[in-house]
Image (tube, rainbow, N blue to C red):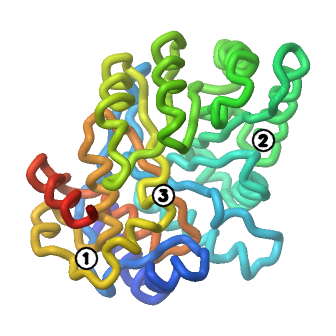
């Protein structure tokens, strides 16, 4: 992205949205970006997908919550701006699911043809029911997802929350061989799922795994992250903000001066850079429906990342 585009996005961020604390109390995505700042120059940090070597921008976009809206133009207009800014910044990975109400349909409606050509779409299958019938239900759900997204070849199809895993993985492997999808993976969002994820990664050949990890929830550092690095599995991180609870933990605290050492000028950037500093992380997917939030989040994907000492400082600031 060139300097003019960065400054344009920064200006848009300064004029839109509420503060993160305000968003927390309204149930909306948490968004804050310092007014008038210059976002660092240079490309977004990219990480390789181990199974192919393809590079992905390390900050993506989640759709749970913000994209679950109706057909009203007033509700969709901010999302259109978010997508425009997202792709203008060089980001590509958008994560969604049929579980997220209208999110797939909204995303499919809003993406332009040019954006569709650049997007790395990750969605999910989660129909229950083992055996032949369960597999068929999954096929029908995935076909519907492709239709709603208007994206016939999904980049990444994931088994959502490990529901009916064996039946769906069988279908996913076949679809990958047939060229209907490019990558396969599994997801979960709770630490209690880690033993199951560890077992699955150990016995199945996966391209991606998605799970929760943040400065406040670091158990993955001892288990899943090193395992994924060892097995050559790409990692997508959800809940990097702990559903907004991280912002509550630092509410009223001044951003420490040491944050500037790794180019962070907001708490959101500190939290996301902490996650991205782990070398096993491929992409983090904070959800937002506001340009202000998006600019703040994407800024974490530029410049330096915290080293070991700085990560310890971040932990101390939150604990």
* Rendered residue at 77%/39% (across/down): 146
Q: Are marks 2 and 3 in contact (CB under 8 Å)?
A: no
Would you say residue 178 is visible in this rendering? no
The dot on residue 145 is 2
Q: Locate residue 98, reporting x and y percent.
A: 76, 46
Q: Position of residue 2 (x, y in %)?
A: 30, 65
Snapshot quadrant of residue 188: top right
Are the residues tagged 1 and 3 within 8 Å (C-beta)? no
The crowd level at tag 2 (other Cα within 10 Å; few <14, some 14-19, many 20+) is: many
Callout 1 crowding tier (Cα within 10 Å): few <14, some 14–19, many ≥20: some
* Mark 2 vs 3, N-terminal side: 2
| 248 w.r.t. 58: above or below | below
| Residue found at the far top of this picture | 203
Q: CA distance from mark 2 to mark 3?
A: 21 Å
Q: CA distance from mark 2 to mark 1?
A: 38 Å
Q: CA distance from mark 1 to mark 3?
A: 21 Å
Q: Which is nearer the eye, 77 or 309?
A: 309
Which residue does the numbered mark 3 point to in the structure image? Answer: 286
Q: Is residue 210 above or below residue 45?
A: above
Foreground mark, 2 or 1? 2
* Residue 214 showing in the rendered view: yes
Q: Which residue is mark 1?
A: 38
Q: Is residue 209 left or right of residue 63?
A: left
Q: Which dot marks residue 300?
A: none
What residue lies at 34% left-to-right and 60% top-to-bottom?
A: 1
């Amino acid at each position: 992205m060139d300097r003019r585009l960065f400054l344009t996005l920064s200006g848009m961020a300064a004029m839109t949205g509420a503060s993160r604390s305000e968003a927390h109390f309204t149930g909306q995505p948490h968004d804050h970006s310092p007014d008038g700042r210059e976002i660092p120059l240079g490309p977004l940090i990219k990480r390789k997908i181990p199974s192919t070597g393809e590079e992905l921008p390390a900050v993506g976009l989640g759709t749970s919550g913000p994209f679950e809206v109706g057909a009203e133009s007033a509700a969709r207009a901010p999302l259109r701006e978010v997508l425009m800014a997202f792709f203008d910044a060089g980001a590509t990975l958008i994560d969604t699911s049929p579980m997220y109400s209208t999110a797939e349909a909204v995303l499919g409606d809003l993406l332009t043809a040019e954006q569709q050509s650049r997007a790395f779409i990750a969605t999910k299958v989660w129909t229950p029911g083992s055996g032949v019938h369960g597999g068929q239900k999954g096929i029908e759900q995935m076909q519907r997802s492709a239709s709603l997204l208007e994206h016939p070849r999904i980049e990444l199809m994931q088994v959502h929350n490990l529901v009916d895993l064996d039946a769906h993985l069988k279908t996913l492997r076949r679809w990958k061989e047939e060229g209907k999808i490019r990558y396969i993976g599994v997801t979960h969002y709770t630490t209690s799922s880690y033993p199951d994820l560890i077992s699955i990664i150990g016995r199945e050949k996966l391209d991606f795994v998605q799970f929760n990890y943040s400065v406040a929830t670091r158990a993955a550092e001892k288990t899943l992250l090193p395992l994924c690095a060892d097995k050559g599995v790409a990692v997508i991180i959800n809940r990097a903000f702990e559903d907004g609870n991280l912002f509550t933990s630092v509410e009223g605290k001044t951003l420490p001066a040491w944050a500037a050492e790794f180019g962070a000028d907001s708490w959101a950037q500190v939290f996301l850079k902490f996650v991205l500093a782990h070398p096993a992380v491929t992409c983090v997917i904070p959800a937002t429906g506001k340009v202000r939030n998006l600019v703040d989040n994407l800024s974490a994907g530029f410049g330096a990342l915290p080293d070991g000492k700085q990560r310890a400082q971040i932990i101390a600031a939150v604990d």
